[in-house]
Every structure is written in C-alpha cells, then in structure tokens.
Image (cartoon, rainbow, N blue to C red):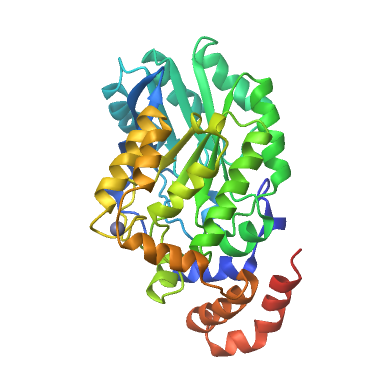
C-alpha cells in the first residue's frame, strides 16, 4: 500500500478494530446528505454536507480510527456513482455553498480515481457554487491533483479542503485513535493548499477514545491552538459519538468511555482566543451513519444547550456560549466532579484497558504471548 503512513500505526489497535468490524454499511446509506449549521457571508446557512461511499477509506481497512465506522465501502461503478451523486448535488443548484466528500479522502486515487474526482467537480462547477468544500487525509494531496481540480472549478470559486488532524498529541493520535498521521504531513498539506489558493479546514476530535472530560478539554484546546498557529483558515470540532462497529462502542459498554458532554464543548470554545471563535464550527450533531449514543448533557438540558451551540455556529456570537454556560442544570455538578476527580494518568489507564480489549477480542492466549510487546510499545512511545 504505497502512500499510507504505516510508521504511525498502532498495530494492536488495528488488530482489535479489524476483529470488531462485523458491521458493514447498508447500500441505502451509500449516498446522502445532511446539513451543517454554519455562518456564510455574514448570515446563518445550512451547509449541505453531501457524502458518498465508494471503495471506502484505505486507512479504515488497516484498522485506523477506532471511533469511526464510516470508512467501509463497496465499489460502485463509476457511471452509477456520478449519476447518483449528481442527483443529490443538482438539488442544491442555486445554493451558494456546498460540501462534498467520500467516506475517506477525496484525493486518494484508490478511493476516488482522478477521472471520477474531476467529474464530481464538473458537476459542482455547473451548479455555480461560490464556495465548494471537500476533505482528504493530508498525505494524499499533491500540487498536480489540486491544480487539476482548480482548473475545473475555475479561479472565482472559493475552494476549501478539510484535513483530519484530530489531536495534536502524537501519543493520543497513535494509542487512543490510531489515526496513522504525522504532524509533518499536515504542515506540508497546509502549505501546499495555500500555495494553490485553497483554504484549509482542520478537523479536531472532541474527546478521543479513552480520554476523560478533563483530558478532552485540554487536548482539544491545544490542538485548535496548534492548528491556528500553523495557519489553518477554519476549524471544525467533531463531537465523538458512539456508533455501531467501533471500538469506542465497546469502551462505552464497558464503562471505560462516554461521549463528551456539552459542558466540555463549551469549556473548549470559551478557552479559545476570541479572534479564533469566528472561524470555528461544530459537527457531529448529525451523521451519515446512525448514532447510538450522541455527545451531550442530561436529557433535561441537552436540547436547550444543543440549540444554543447550533445558534453559535450560525452567528459566531459568543453570547450564546455564555448563555449556555450559565444554564442551571444539576448535571453540571456531575461534570465538575468528574473534571476535578483525581485519576490515574491516561497512559496507566490505557495499559489496563488494552489488556481488557486484548483478552476480549484476541483471547487470553494471544494476550499472554503478546502483552509484553504491546505494552512496551505503549509505554515507551515518546
Ligand atoms: Zn443537564
């Protein structure tokens, strides 16, 4: 597999993920859209988020990203793919802005061959959108691929590429997510996009698997700070949800992990420099694949806080965050207790959870013969 960033792979998590993946996406879920609340040209806008599943994410097949189940695919003949995607995209002709993405990377030729990619951008060009966005893993971007798309879109269209960053912490990326990503590749991709007059949107995961609420806040704030300091134009925080066929689901069932609370989300947003807030959005309220347990607070305050968070996304007005933060609900005390409760360092907890995962998925015998190498890798990882 040329191009894939195997140096950053956590082989243990890959192995567990491949065991857990019995779930596959149903064919009616291969194409679709939902909308994401954003602010566009000074007004609230429901950005159509159009997705298609073709051959699937190359990294998903290697067991990467243990919280995600969207990477699986089945090959769709090129003509059928273009026709089905065209039906969805043309519904939005006349709208100013659109986001179109495969389940992995728009610029991975093995997932979206170049002639298919260019055909998709011709469909977008024909719709006269003023703003077009997509996403790709950083290492699949090259100048010639971006130029080819730019040529189809024309210079007058604002073009944005979303890069999955998730966490700036290399230990978390490898041992809690298995993202298989080096920060160097992100830095290179940011420079490349800017040279090609493409804006960069960084995807940051709120609360990677294994992290608690306190660690999640710290991780997301550090990651966003790194991203803005390295020149990203906009940033989207993804709320981790629990979905079928993921290691995260197993962790949730075993009481090891819960999706982030809105209290943590608010804390993250309110910790950012005010000048960055207008460039930040949230997603994960909806998903292409059904959510078993969403991020959020208790049932009593979740609808209200969610609505304020979405209003913030539409307006970028910090007063909605302050209003949400001040909302009186008992569950805030439980969150504060959790944030303040002393607990074992993340590394030590992950050692314990790897053992539970290893024994459950790979068997006691496998674990006994491999525990030393798995735990040495984990503990010696810088
Ligand atoms: Zn509540």
Residue 85, position as x, y percentages in the image: 34, 31
Q: In which quarter of the image is ligand 1?
A: bottom left
Q: In this view, does 330 lie above or below 308?
A: below
Q: Position of residue 225 (x, y in %)?
A: 63, 41
Q: Nearer the viewer, residue 324 or 260?
A: 324
Front in this rendered view, residue 173 or 86? 173
Q: Horizontally, is 106 left or right of 97 in the view?
A: right
Q: Which residue lies furthest to the left in this view?
A: 300
Measured as percent of width and height from the top left, residue 27 is found at: 30, 49
Please say whether residue 382 is visible from this viewpoint.
yes
150 left or right of 306 in image: right
Which residue lies at the image location 35% right of the left edge and 45% below the top edge? 324
Count of labels in the image: 0
Q: Position of residue 372 (x, y in %)?
A: 71, 83
Q: In which quarter of the image is residue 298?
A: bottom left
Camera-side residue: 73 or 265?
Answer: 265
Instruction: Give the residue drawn at x 52%, y 55%.
Output: 60
Question: Measuring 51% from the left and 71% from the top, which residue is drawn there?
Answer: 341
Image height check: is 181 above or below 132?
below
Q: Is residue 23 visible?
A: no
Side of 114 relative to 168 (left or right): left
Q: In this view, does 184 lie above or below 379?
A: above
């Amino acid at each position: 597999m040329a191009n894939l960033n195997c140096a950053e792979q956590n082989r243990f998590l890959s192995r567990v993920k491949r065991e857990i993946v019995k779930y596959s996406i149903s064919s009616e879920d291969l194409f679709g859209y939902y909308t994401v609340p954003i602010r566009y040209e000074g007004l609230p806008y429901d950005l159509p988020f159009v997705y298609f599943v073709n051959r699937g994410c190359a990294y998903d097949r290697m067991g990467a990203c243990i919280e995600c189940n969207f990477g699986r695919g089945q090959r769709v003949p090129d003509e059928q793919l273009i026709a089905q995607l065209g039906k969805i995209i043309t519904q939005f002709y006349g709208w100013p802005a659109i986001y179109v993405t495969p389940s992995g990377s728009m610029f991975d030729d093995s997932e979206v061959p170049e002639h298919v990619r260019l055909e998709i951008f011709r469909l977008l060009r024909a719709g006269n959108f003023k703003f077009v966005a997509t996403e790709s893993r950083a290492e699949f971007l090259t100048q010639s691929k971006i130029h080819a798309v730019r040529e189809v879109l024309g210079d007058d269209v604002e073009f944005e590429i979303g890069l999955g960053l998730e966490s700036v912490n290399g230990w978390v990326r490898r041992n809690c997510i298995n993202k298989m990503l080096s920060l160097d590749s992100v830095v290179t991709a940011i420079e490349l996009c800017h040279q090609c007059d493409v804006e960069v949107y960084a995807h940051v995961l709120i609360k990677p698997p294994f992290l608690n609420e306190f660690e999640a806040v710290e991780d997301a704030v550090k990651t966003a700070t790194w991203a803005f300091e390295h020149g990203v134009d906009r940033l989207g925080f993804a709320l981790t949800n629990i979905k079928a066929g993921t290691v995260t689901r197993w962790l949730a069932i075993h009481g090891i992990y819960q999706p982030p609370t809105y209290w943590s989300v608010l804390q993250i947003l309110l910790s950012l420099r005010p000048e960055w807030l207008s460039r930040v959005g949230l997603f994960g309220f909806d998903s292409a694949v059904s959510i078993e347990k969403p991020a959020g607070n208790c049932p009593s305050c979740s609808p209200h806080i969610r609505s304020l968070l979405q209003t913030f996304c539409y307006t970028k007005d910090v007063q909605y965050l302050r209003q949400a933060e001040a909302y009186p609900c008992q569950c805030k005390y439980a969150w504060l207790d959790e944030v303040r409760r002393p607990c074992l360092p993340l590394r030590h907890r992950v050692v314990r959870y790897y053992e539970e995962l290893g024994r459950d998925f790979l068997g006691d015998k496998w674990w006994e013969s491999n525990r030393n190498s798995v735990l040495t890798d984990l503990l010696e990882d810088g």
